[in-house]
Amino acid sequence: MEKYKLGEMEQKFADLIWENEPIKSGELAELCAKSFDWKRTTTYTMLKRLCDRQIFKNDNGTVMALMTKEDFLSGQGEVFLEETFGGSLPKFLTAFTNRKKLSKKEIEEIQRMIDAYKES
């Protein structure tokens, strides 16, 4: 899903909104001028792009998220897993752990997640 694929500057822009929402679009443009050296039109173009993807909305000049950053990152993870490992979490974990040894703490955390999932 293209909704969850952001370029580097789109991601930085999205993070800026999540950190400051709700924010007036004029204030957002000022913040982007300071943070990214953008012109006002660049900010509004980028905002429209992310609103079209239904990540944010601009409601009468107030910009707010339609999804939390955590929900967005979860969606990105699902797309990555689907495209790269055919949606298989075990295949991902196998590939990941072949290159990086999990710490005892990480193993315990994963086990807690599995146990909580079994109980629900």
Image (spheres, rainbow, N blue to C red):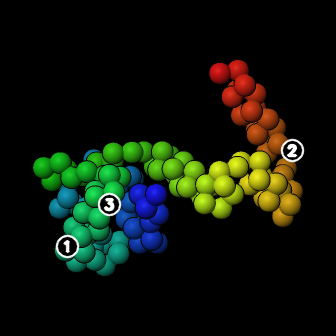
> Disc 2 and disc 1: Cα gap in Å?
49 Å
Residue under the point 66% across and 55% down: 86
SS state under label 2: helix
Residue 69 point in image, percent of width and height: 45, 49
Q: Tag 3 or tag 1, which sits nearer the N-term?
A: 1
Between residues 48 and 60, which one lies in front from this camera angle? 48
Report the amino acid beneath label 1.
Arg
Residue 110 image-quadrant placement: top right
Residue corresponding to mark 1: 40
| Residue type indicated by callout 2 | Lys
Query: Is the C-beta separation of discs 2 and 3 under 8 Å?
Result: no
Up the image or down, 104 lies above or below 61; here it is above
Disc 3: which residue: 50
Residue at x-position 76% and y-position 38%: 109
Q: Position of residue 41 (x, y in %)?
A: 19, 74
> Where is residue 119, by image quadrant?
top right
Query: Disc 3 residue type?
Result: Leu
Please name the residue shown 61% across and 54% down the image: 82
The answer to which of 4 and 43 lies nearer the viewer is 4
* Residue visible at 39% across and 45% down in the picture: 67
Q: Secondary structure at mark 1?
A: helix
Residue 22 left/right relative to 13: left
Mark 2: give few (<14), some (14-19) or many (20+) Cα within 10 Å.
few
